[in-house]
Image: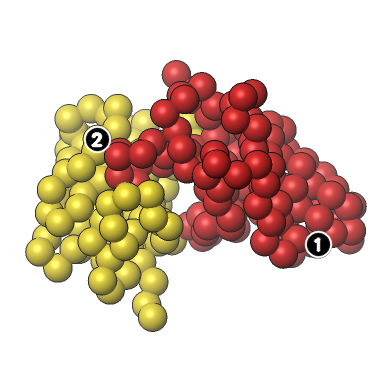
């Protein structure tokens, strides 16, 4: 059972454009939602994370929007750059369940110059 | 500050053999988690250890096992290897056992032939 669904699977954006990746979850016990960025040959690296008590969190060009009632959250990358080309994963954890991450399927982003 | 170190980086094993992978977490981190990454199944949680105790276990057969030592270093073992065990195995370390940022290593690429 895929508890975190991510879309799209792949995304092509022009340099300077906005990249938007969406995730939906089923388990209402999830209460911590990180996003990870992975470059080829590397492990995932934390990009930004949000808890459900806020609806939006912004760090530089990266923004998470969170809709608790819809059980959805999304990553927006503003002014996308070729260096942002990577695979992005949303994830979720349950309070009291340690650091066990449930990942979405991933989105391969390509930013064209 | 050194990152998460996984050894070896690459392994080729024959079906039926067993394999042991090693992970050295960031100094001071006490939680170590293991994930399997494949193109078909994405990133899947294997298990998490905190202070030498298994905290969580994912939905994998008993052939997959792990342990953590008093210095927080961790090993995972896969016995009776199957072709489907071919994957990138990622280790992540965290400061505590409660929804803290997970830092990933570069992974061990296991190929079973």
Is residue A74 visible to us here? Answer: yes
- Chain A colour as displayed: red
Query: Which chain letter goes with mark 1?
Result: A
Mark number for residue A72? none
Marks 1 and 2 share the same chain: no
Q: Is residue B64 above or below residue B90?
A: above
Query: Could you tell me which secondary element the residue under label 2 belongs to?
Result: strand
Q: Is residue B104 above or below residue A6?
A: below
Is residue B81 visible to us here? Answer: no
Mark number for residue A81? 1
Rendered-image quadrant of the N terminus of chain B: bottom left
Position of residue B71 measured from the top left corner of the image (x, y, whole percent): 14, 68
Position of residue A88 measured from the top left corner of the image (x, y, whole percent): 62, 47
Mark number for residue B57? 2
Query: Which of B44/A58 is in front?
Result: A58
Q: What is the C-alpha distance between the residues marked 1 and 2?
A: 38 Å
Side of A102 relative to B62 (left or right): right
Query: Which chain letter goes with mark 2?
Result: B
Position of residue A37 measured from the top left corner of the image (x, y, whole percent): 59, 54
- Chain B colour as displayed: yellow
Count of all numbered marks drawn on residues in the image? 2
Would you call the spot at circle 2 few (<14 residues within 10 Å), some (14-19), or many (20 or more)?
Answer: some
Q: Is residue B111 above or below residue B24?
A: above
Residue depicted at x 10% and y 64%: B70
Position of residue B99 measured from the top left corner of the image (x, y, whole percent): 38, 49
Residue depicted at x 48% and y 57%: A43
Residue depicted at x 20% and y 63%: B73
Query: Could you tell me which secondary element the residue under label 1 belongs to?
Result: loop
Q: Residue furthest top?
A: A1
Rendered-image quadrant of the C terminus of chain B: top left
Residue depicted at x 42% and y 47%: B88
Q: How is the image coloured?
A: by chain
């Amino acid at each position: 059972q895929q508890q975190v669904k991510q879309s799209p699977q792949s995304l092509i954006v022009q340099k300077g454009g906005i990249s938007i990746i969406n995730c939906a979850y089923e388990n209402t016990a999830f209460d911590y939602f990180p996003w990870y960025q992975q470059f080829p040959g590397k492990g995932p690296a934390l990009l930004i994370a949000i808890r459900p008590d806020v609806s939006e969190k912004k760090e530089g060009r990266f923004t998470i929007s969170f809709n608790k009632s819809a059980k959805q959250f999304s990553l927006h990358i503003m002014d996308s750059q070729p260096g942002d080309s990577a695979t992005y994963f949303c994830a979720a954890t349950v309070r009291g369940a340690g650091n066990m991450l449930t990942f979405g399927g991933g989105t391969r982003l390509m930013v064209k110059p | 500050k050194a990152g998460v170190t996984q050894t070896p980086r690459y392994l080729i094993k024959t079906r039926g053999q067993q394999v042991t992978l090693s992970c050295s977490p960031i100094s001071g981190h006490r939680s170590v988690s293991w994930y399997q990454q494949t193109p078909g199944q994405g990133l899947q949680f294997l298990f998490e250890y905190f202070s030498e105790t298994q905290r969580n276990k994912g939905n994998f057969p008993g052939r997959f096992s792990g342990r953590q030592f008093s210095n927080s270093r961790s090993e995972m073992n896969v016995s009776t290897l199957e072709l489907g065990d071919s994957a990138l195995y990622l280790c992540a370390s965290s400061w505590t056992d409660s929804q803290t940022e997970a830092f990933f290593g570069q992974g061990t690429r296991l190929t079973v032939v």
